[in-house]
Image (tube, coloured by chain):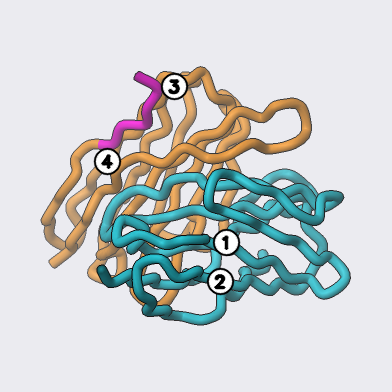
Amino acid sequence: EAQVTQNPRYLITVTGKKLTVTCSQNMNHEYMSWYRQDPGLGLRQIYYSMNVEVTDKGDVPEGYKVSRKEKRNFPLILESPSPNQTSLYFCASSSLGGRVYNEQFFGPGTRLTVL
Amino acid sequence: SQQGEEDPQALSIQEGENATMNCSYKTSINNLQWYRQNSGRGLVHLILIRSNEREKHSGRLRVTLDTSKKSSSLLITASRAADTASYFCALMNSGYSTLTFGKGTMLLVSP
């Protein structure tokens, strides 16, 4: 089944304790992206990647890191989490289809609470 | 990057009625996409309309795009309780690098 998986689905942690949220897709998509969703703010893009070893900042990259060493994986790293990073996080992927982007496929979300 | 603005923020209708949501934006786009999100879950792609298209249909969904007014509308006909969800428009920028989501319209369809 074609899907985007994220782990963990729920995480409660404390300020300053490094964490990684994994994202994996099995559709051989070139494009992957991380978003955070907060009430009243909608979805905001954190980082995206057009292909292996190519990553770029989105609208809200501060406090986050990403890597794209393999095509299928795009982990999100919080080196020193803070309470303002408490949010619902989504990973998404898409084929590039030439120069026109197709639909994005979303993972189920990771609800992160930083105390 | 620009964000689409959906209108209304919330919409409550009865089953069988039509639901119309609008999205406005400010700068040029490559395409505009509509997504649906059930409470707290991942978004699901509904329909994509390119900048050179004016109307698209998919089942009970009809999307229009007016690039001169920089606006799009999503019409759901003969709504069902199962259509209850949040609906987001998303703008693909002309550089093909980012997809920017609006804040969404919450649709409640009562039986």
Callouts 4 and 3 close, C-beta under 8 Å: no
* Label ID, residue B21: 2
| Range shown magenta | A1-6
Chain letter of disc 3 in the image? A
Query: Same subunit under labels 4 and 1?
Result: no
Chain letter of disc 2 in the image? B
CA distance for labels 3 and 1: 26 Å
Residue appearing at x 64%, y 36% in the figure: A102
Q: Is residue A2 magenta?
A: yes
Amino acid marked by disc 1: Cys
Q: Is residue A95 above or below residue A28?
A: below
Camera-nearest label, 3 or 1: 1
**Quadrant of the rendered structure where residue A84 is?**
bottom left
- Which residue is disc 1 drawn over? B89
CA distance for labels 1 and 2: 9 Å
Amino acid marked by disc 3: Arg
Categorize mark 3 by other alpha carbons within 10 Å: few (<14), some (14-19), many (20+).
Answer: many
Q: Is residue A66 left or right of residue B75?
A: left
Chain letter for the orange part = A
Residue appearing at x 64%, y 50% in the figure: B98
Q: Is residue A24 magenta?
A: no
The kind of secondary structure element at disc 2 is: strand
Query: Same subunit under labels 4 and 3?
Result: yes
The kind of secondary structure element at disc 1 is: strand
- Which residue is disc 4 drawn over? A20
Residue A22 placement (x, y as % from top left): 30, 34
Q: Is residue A83 left or right of residue B67?
A: left
Chain letter of disc 1 in the image? B
CA distance for labels 2 and 3: 35 Å
- Which residue is disc 3 drawn over? A72
Camera-nearest label, 4 or 3: 3
